[in-house]
Amino acid sequence: MLRVKGRGVKTQKGTGDLLAELQVAVPSHLDGEAREALERFHELEPKENPRADLISKARG
């Protein structure tokens, strides 16, 4: 569940937060070619935290 502050329903009291529920479908069976592609992607992907920049901005 993700909360997007201030992007929800507008009322007389103000604007609420938008709540978004994510559903991730992960395949349970992969053929050899698909498995190799995912393993190669994992080797090449950056090892950084994608939220590090957001966290530093939030802390000011």
Image: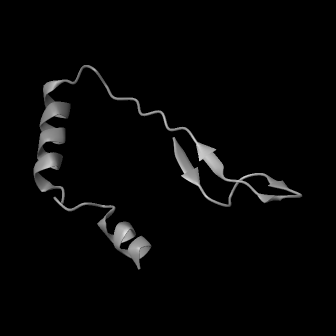
Q: Which percent across, then down, holds residue 38? A: 18, 40
Q: Is residue 18 left or right of residue 2?
A: right
Residue furthest out toward the right: 12
Q: Which percent across, then down, holds residue 48? A: 20, 62
Q: Which percent across, then down, holds residue 41? A: 17, 48
Identity of the residue drawn at 18% across and 24% down: 31
Residue 53 placement: quadrant:
bottom left
Q: Which percent across, then down, holds residue 49? A: 25, 60
34 lies above or below 43:
above
Identity of the residue drawn at 28% across and 20% down: 28
Q: Is residue 3 left or right of residue 44?
A: right
Identity of the residue drawn at 20% across and 33% down: 34
Q: Between residues 38 and 20, which one lies in front from this camera angle?
A: 20
Residue furthest out toward the bottom: 60
Residue 35 placement: quadrant:
top left
Quadrant assignment for the C terminus: bottom left
Q: Between residues 22 and 16, which one lies in front from this camera angle?
A: 16
Q: Is residue 3 left or right of residue 18?
A: left
